[in-house]
């Protein structure tokens, strides 16, 4: 089973993806985590990605597509994956379709996490304080939300026609949301 978690930053994709992954026994893969690790390692990928991440912009597809290919072609992903934070552009979505098709698989479910904007900002400010994430400061938060609306939200229409999009209300307790995710995945 291949599941995409779609939603703005702060919507709870990471937390819920981890819970879902444990429940169904599939790896949860987050391009944001992989990119942050690459930045810490100061390798070529990290050096290219960091300026975009620091400004709250998407890392360009030509940089991210290689990472996505690596992830989806790995043996760990053979039984399916929970995709957290990708695809984020139509170009990435097309790449995901192509890569899954190559192993006779497809996107089975897209969970759209719905959370009001003021709640997102509140959560992201809290995360910035706790984790010291350099991209979670107020201007960058606004930037990331704008980028989501402009570049990632159109993916809902991309998948909607296939009848695989399920909206998940992303407010309430972690347990309550996990229960909704469970229902949504079936
Ligand atoms: P996240 O932890 O998913 O919010 O990602 C943090 C940052 O990493 C984003 O603001 C982007 O700069 C970058 N990033 C993560 N995943 C992607 C992706 N699939 N495409 C482009 N940029 C990404």
Image (cartoon, grey):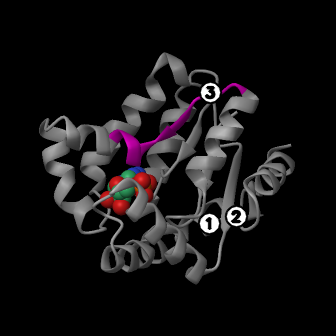
Q: Is residue 127 left or right of residue 119?
A: left
**In which image quadrant can residue 116 be found?**
bottom right
Q: Is residue 57 left or right of residue 117?
A: left
Give whichever of 177, 51 is nearer the camera. Answer: 177
**Residue 97 x/y as whole percent:** 54, 43
Q: Is residue 110 left or right of residue 71?
A: right
Q: Residue at 31% of width from left, 68% of height from top? A: 56
**In which image quadrant can residue 37 be found?**
top left
State the extent of the magenta-drawn residues as a range: 25-34
N-terminal-most mark, 1 or 3: 3
N-terminal-most mark, 2 or 3: 3
Whether label 1 lies within 8 Å of ligand 1 gets the answer: no
Mark 2–mark 3 Cα distance, whole angstroms, equals 21 Å
Q: Which residue lies under the disc numbered 2?
A: 160
Callout 1 touching callout 3 (CB < 8 Å): no
Q: Residue at 27% of width from left, 61% of height from top? A: 134
**Residue 13 x/y as whole percent:** 59, 53
Quadrant including the N terminus = top right
Mark 1–mark 2 Cα distance, whole angstroms, equals 6 Å
Seen as rendered, the residue at the extreme bottom is: 118
Is residue 151 rendered magenta in the image? no
Q: Which residue lies under the disc numbered 1?
A: 156
Packing grade of label 3 (10 A; few <14, some 14-19, many >=20) is few
Give whichever of 175, 60 is nearer the camera. Answer: 175
Callout 1 touching callout 2 (CB < 8 Å): yes
Mark count: 3
Is residue 29 rendered magenta in the image? yes
Q: Which residue lies under the disc numbered 3?
A: 104
């Amino acid at each position: 089973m291949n599941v995409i978690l779609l939603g703005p930053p702060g919507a709870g994709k990471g937390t819920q993806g981890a819970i879902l992954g444990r429940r169904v026994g599939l790896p949860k893969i987050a391009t944001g985590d992989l990119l942050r690790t690459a930045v810490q390692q100061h390798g070529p990928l990290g050096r290219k990605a960091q300026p975009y991440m620091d400004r709250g912009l998407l890392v360009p597809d030509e940089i991210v597509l290689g990472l996505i290919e690596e992830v989806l072609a790995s043996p760990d992903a053979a039984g399916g994956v929970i995709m957290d934070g990708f695809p984020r552009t139509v170009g990435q979505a097309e790449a995901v379709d192509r890569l899954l098709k190559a192993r006779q698989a497809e996107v089975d479910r897209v969970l759209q996490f719905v959370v009001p904007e003021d709640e997102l900002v509140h959560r992201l400010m809290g995360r910035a304080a706790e984790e010291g994430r350099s991209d979670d400061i107020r201007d960058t938060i606004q930037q990331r939300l704008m980028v989501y609306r402009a570049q990632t939200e159109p993916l809902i229409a991309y998948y909607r026609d296939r009848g695989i999009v399920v909206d998940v209300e992303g407010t309430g307790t972690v347990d309550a949301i996990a229960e909704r995710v469970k229902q949504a995945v079936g």
